[in-house]
């Protein structure tokens, strides 16, 4: 069984990845650590299926996932992990506006995604208010290469909005099979590397043949670091 302690250990590994990505910009060690964290999350989700909610304490992430699967039977679900704090939860769909889907957790933290791409957060503090993606979401969903300009807007601790403009290069990578909950599908790994002067980070997306994000690791700002998003049920 993957316990909360083991999950937090995996999260600490991802935290190191975030620090490397923001300074030296990702090397083989960082990639290996990210993969280890995603493998742990995959094991967690797999082990939650069929679990009895009373089998262990309410703090067990397996129980949290199993309860969500029963409570939202048949509905789309997504597992969310915030690497900086180790907080995790299950999110269900709150609303749809054209191509943007808003997901919300039980503690009313929300994330908005334009197809595969994170475009806003609420409830984290220092939230990502919006993203002008320059066409990046469409390229990633289509599994195509390209270079775009993206504008990120954040809310700081004094309720002021700041803006960050970056040049982002999107590159298709290898194919990988992802098994997550009831989902088992072949994906193309898409990497989006964004730069402004010496600052740099990489978002990674696993996209299936229908253009759906199966899992991703996406930057949500300097204060909030990376979010791991993994679909559990379509």
Image (spheres, rainbow, N blue to C red):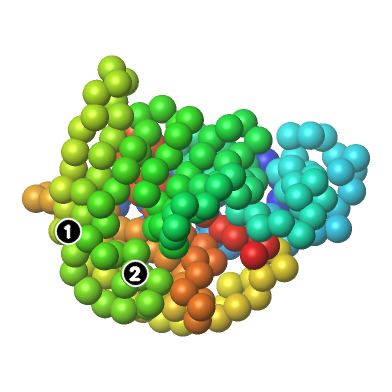
The extreme top residue here reads 158
Mark 2–mark 1 contact, CB under 8 Å? no
**Category of crowding for the residue at label 2, using alpha-carbon neighbours closer than 10 angstroms: few (below 14), some (14–19), many (at least 20):** some
The extreme left residue here reads 197
**Which badge, 2 or 1, is on the more N-terminal residue?**
2
Can I make out residue 72 in this image?
Answer: yes
Task: Name the side, left or right, on which 216 lies relative to 58.
Answer: left
Give the vertical position of 178 relative to 225 (above or below).
Answer: below
Element type where label 2 sits in the image: helix
In the foreground, 66 or 84: 66
Residue at 42% across / 65% down in the picture? 205
Q: Find residue 192 and name its label.
A: none
Residue at 41% across / 27% down in the picture? 125
How many circles with numbers are drawn on the protein?
A: 2
Question: In the rendering, at what x and y percent does residue 194 appear?
Answer: 22, 57
> Which residue is denoted by mark 2 in the rendering?
138
The extreme front residue here reads 98
Question: In the rendering, at what x and y percent does residue 165 appear?
Answer: 16, 48
Task: Name the side, left or right, on which 88 lies relative to 158.
Answer: right
The picture quadrant where one finds residue 135 is bottom left
Task: Name the side, left or right, on which 51 lies relative to 145.
Answer: right
In the foreground, 139 or 231: 139
- C-alpha gap between disc 2 and disc 1: 13 Å
The picture quadrant where one finds residue 161 is top left
Question: In the rendering, at what x and y percent does residue 119 appear?
Answer: 37, 49
Give the vertical position of 36 relative to 146 (above or below).
Answer: above
Residue at 24% across / 23% down in the picture? 160
Q: Quadrant of the C terminus?
A: bottom right
| Camera-nearest label, 2 or 1 | 2
Question: In the rendering, at what x and y percent does residue 154 appear?
Answer: 28, 35
Give the vertical position of 184 relative to 64 (above or below).
Answer: below
> Which residue is denoted by mark 1 in the rendering?
149
């Amino acid at each position: 069984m993957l316990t909360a302690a083991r999950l937090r250990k995996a999260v600490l590994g991802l935290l190191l990845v975030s620090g490397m990505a923001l300074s030296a910009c990702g090397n083989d060690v960082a990639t290996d650590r990210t993969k280890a964290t995603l493998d742990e999350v995959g094991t967690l989700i797999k082990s939650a299926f069929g679990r009895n909610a009373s089998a262990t304490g309410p703090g067990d992430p397996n129980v949290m996932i199993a309860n969500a699967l029963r409570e939202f039977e048949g509905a789309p679900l997504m597992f969310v992990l915030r690497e900086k704090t180790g907080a995790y939860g299950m999110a269900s769909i709150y609303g749809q506006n054209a191509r943007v889907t808003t997901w919300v957790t039980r503690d009313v933290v929300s994330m908005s995604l334009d197809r595969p791409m994170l475009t806003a957060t609420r409830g984290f503090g220092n939230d990502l208010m919006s993203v002008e993606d320059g066409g990046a979401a469409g390229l990633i969903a289509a599994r195509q290469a390209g270079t775009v300009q993206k504008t990120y807007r954040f809310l700081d601790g004094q309720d002021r909005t700041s803006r960050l403009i970056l040049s982002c290069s999107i590159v298709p990578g290898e194919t990988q099979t992802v098994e997550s909950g009831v989902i088992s599908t072949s994906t193309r790994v898409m990497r989006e590397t964004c730069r402004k002067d010496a600052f740099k980070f990489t978002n990674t997306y696993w996209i299936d043949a229908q253009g759906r994000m199966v899992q991703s690791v996406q930057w949500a700002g300097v204060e909030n670091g990376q979010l791991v998003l993994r679909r559990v049920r379509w």
